[in-house]
């Protein structure tokens, strides 16, 4: 969910913590298989989000990254807040708002790449949510859960 201009989604596989403790003692091969599954799931979420992201200039799509942390058994898929600070606004939508100049008589605005000045208040209409991260996450969630459960069933 939104945190600043970041979005975070998480998934929990029941029993994974206990299984991981056992893996440390018994089976490094199974641990590597689970790491591979989680890493692959992160890449799949990233690719799914990129394919679902609305494309105007491609900046939003190109800002989506995935990184795997083996120590925490965690894949992090996120948008780069510097490249696409508007990502959460597209994912969750925005209510209508009114903006007006502060300390000045007019505001400089841009539309279609052109600058123009507006005096007084401007109403920006509501923008509906166009989710791209959550659907990608939800599509991958059952696949990785099933893959990890299968690995846990075949553990020695």
Image: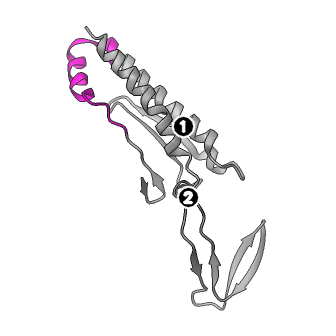
Residue nearer the viewer, 45 or 135: 135
Q: Total of numbered circles in the picture?
A: 2
Residue 51: percent from left, percent from top = 63, 39
What segment carries the magenta color?
11-31
Q: Are marks 1 and 2 in contact (CB under 8 Å)?
A: no
Quarter in which the C terminus is drawn: top left
Q: Which residue is mark 1?
A: 46
Image disc number at residue 129: none
Instruction: Give whichever of discs 1 and 2 has the lower sequence position.
Output: 1
Magenta stretch containing residue 141, yes or no?
Answer: no
Q: Is residue 43 left or right of residue 114?
A: left
Q: Check disc 1 and report its element: helix, strand or loop.
A: helix
Q: Secondary structure at mark 2?
A: loop
The residue wearing badge 2 is 85
> Residue 91: x and y, percent?
54, 53
Q: Nearer the viewer, residue 33 or 94?
A: 94
Q: Residue at x 62, y 42 (%)?
A: 52
| Quarter location, residue 32 | top left
Chief SS of the magenta region: helix
Q: Where residue 50 sits in the image (x, y, percent)?
A: 61, 40
Residue at 52%, 54% in the rendered image: 81
């Amino acid at each position: 969910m939104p945190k600043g201009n970041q979005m975070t989604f998480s998934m929990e596989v029941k029993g994974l913590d206990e299984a991981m403790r056992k893996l440390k003692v018994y089976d490094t091969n199974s641990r590597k298989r689970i790491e591979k599954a989680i890493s692959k799931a992160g890449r799949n979420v990233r690719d799914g989000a990129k394919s679902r992201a609305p494309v105007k200039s491609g900046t939003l799509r190109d800002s989506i990254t995935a990184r795997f942390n083996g120590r925490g058994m965690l894949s992090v898929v996120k948008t780069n807040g510097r490249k696409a600070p508007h990502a959460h606004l597209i994912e969750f939508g925005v209510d209508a708002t009114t903006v007006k100049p502060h300390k000045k008589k007019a505001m400089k605005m841009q539309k279609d790449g052109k600058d123009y000045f507006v005096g007084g208040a401007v109403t920006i209409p509501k923008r509906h949510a166009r989710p791209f991260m959550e659907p990608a996450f939800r599509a991958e969630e059952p696949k990785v859960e099933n893959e990890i459960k299968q690995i846990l069933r075949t553990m020695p």
